[in-house]
């Protein structure tokens, strides 16, 4: 068992990951953000508290990062008390010249690929490995240890990390070379949010047209258009806005990263920009702090319809 560090254990996804790492026998150290209540059970289960990311780097073999996005990841890695600041602290003063840290940083956040590339290069210069391993599924699966993980890494890195990742994931997929993980994640989230925004719009149009939206759901549920994402959105018709526990502003951030990626590759992103602006509009209307199904509430506000049963 390796010593694992964790940044972001108080988050909705991070808590479950950290809990399962500890439950599977790994020594666990974590930084504690403002919300101490969210990590009280982890500390009670034997996790230790580190004063800073630098302190984690000095004592851990692997450090997981699970935070909001690239700015937070960059701060954790390159800040004054960041991981790189402490990466070589574990190398003894008597070590031979050129001794390097063996630290591995695993970014489970949804991050921007350009930022990931810069961080990987900075880490490599310090003898530190940086692996992108973003997540799919929800906080429910995180707590159950049944997440999906898409890993961008060399074959050697993946082979070394796979047993650790399996502590909290049902499916660990090696999606390609370093950087591929975050790219695949953005493609995944673009498709998911396209379904969400299309469903919310269709509900508004159908309500205005006077059709029974439950019949639309019944039809789609029986056909090829059906998906878990659609079913989460369909729950809004019965008043359930928590069917997809993913904050709308986080989805907006992910679509911004996706459209940046498309633009950098000179690929027109007509649908991506529309999805991004639909999320931006819902956020401007005050729904950014709610879950993605509140796209339906934004459509109610825009169209004067009543869709969500209250």
Image (cartoon, rainbow, N blue to C red):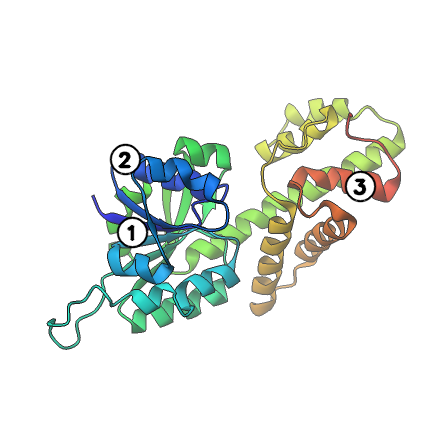
Q: CA distance from mark 1 to mark 3?
A: 43 Å
- Please provide percent x and percent y for residue 105: 34, 58
Point out the frontmost of discs 2 and 1.
2
Per the image, label 3 sits on a secondary structure element best described as: helix
- Please provide percent x and percent y for residue 93: 15, 72
Per the image, label 2 sits on a secondary structure element best described as: loop
| Residue tagged 2 | 24
Label 1 environment density (alpha carbons within 10 Å; few <14, some 14–19, many ≥20): many
Q: Nearer the viewer, residue 31 or 103?
A: 31
Q: CA distance from mark 2 to mark 3?
A: 44 Å
Per the image, label 1 sits on a secondary structure element best described as: helix
Q: Residue at 72%, 55% (x, y): give it.
A: 277
For marks 1 and 3 on the same chain, the one whose residue lies earlier in the sequence: 1
Q: Is residue 21 above or below residue 97?
A: above
Number of marks present in the image shown: 3
Q: Nearer the viewer, residue 212 or 127?
A: 127
| Residue tagged 1 | 158
Q: Is residue 57 left or right of residue 114?
A: left
Q: Is residue 52 left or right of residue 203?
A: left
For the residues bearing labels 2 and 3, Cβ distance under 8 angstroms:
no
Label 2 environment density (alpha carbons within 10 Å; few <14, some 14–19, many ≥20): few
Residue 227 is marked as none
- Please provide percent x and percent y for residue 155: 27, 55
Label 3 environment density (alpha carbons within 10 Å; few <14, some 14–19, many ≥20): many
| Residue tagged 3 | 299
- Please provide percent x and percent y for residue 164: 28, 44
Q: Nearer the viewer, residue 160 or 122?
A: 122
For the residues bearing labels 1 and 3, Cβ distance under 8 angstroms:
no
Residue 189 visible at all: yes
């Amino acid at each position: 068992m390796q010593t694992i560090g964790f940044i972001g254990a108080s988050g909705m996804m991070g808590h479950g990951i950290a809990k399962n790492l500890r439950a599977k026998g790994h020594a666990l150290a974590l930084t504690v953000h403002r919300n101490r209540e969210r990590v009280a059970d982890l500390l009670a289960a034997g996790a230790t508290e580190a004063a800073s990311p630098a302190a984690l780097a000095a004592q851990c073999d692997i450090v997981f990062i699970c935070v909001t996005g690239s700015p937070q990841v960059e701060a954790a890695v390159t800040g004054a008390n960041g991981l790189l600041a402490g990466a070589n602290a574990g190398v003894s003063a008597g070590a031979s010249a050129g001794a390097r840290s063996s630290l591995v940083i695993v970014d489970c956040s949804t991050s921007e690929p350009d930022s990931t590339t810069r961080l990987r290069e900075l880490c490599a210069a310090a003898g530190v490995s940086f692996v992108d391993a973003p997540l799919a599924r929800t906080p429910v699966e995180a707590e159950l240890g049944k997440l999906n993980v898409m890993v961008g890494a060399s074959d050697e890195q993946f082979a070394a990390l796979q047993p650790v990742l399996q502590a909290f994931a049902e499916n660990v997929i090696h999606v390609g070379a370093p950087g591929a993980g975050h790219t695949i994640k953005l493609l995944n989230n673009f498709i998911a949010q396209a379904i969400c925004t299309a469903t919310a719009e269709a509900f508004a149009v159908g309500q205005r047209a006077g059709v029974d939206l439950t019949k639309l759901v019944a039809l789609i549920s029986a056909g090829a258009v059906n998906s878990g994402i659609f079913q989460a959105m369909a729950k809004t018709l019965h008043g359930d806005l928590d069917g997809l526990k993913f904050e709308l502003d986080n989805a907006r951030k992910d679509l911004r990263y996706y459209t940046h990626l498309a633009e950098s590759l000179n690929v027109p992103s007509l649908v991506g920009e529309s999805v991004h602006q639909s999320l931006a509009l819902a956020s401007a209307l005050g729904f950014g702090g709610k879950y993605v199904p509140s796209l339906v509430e934004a459509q109610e506000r825009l169209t004067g319809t009543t869709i969500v049963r209250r």
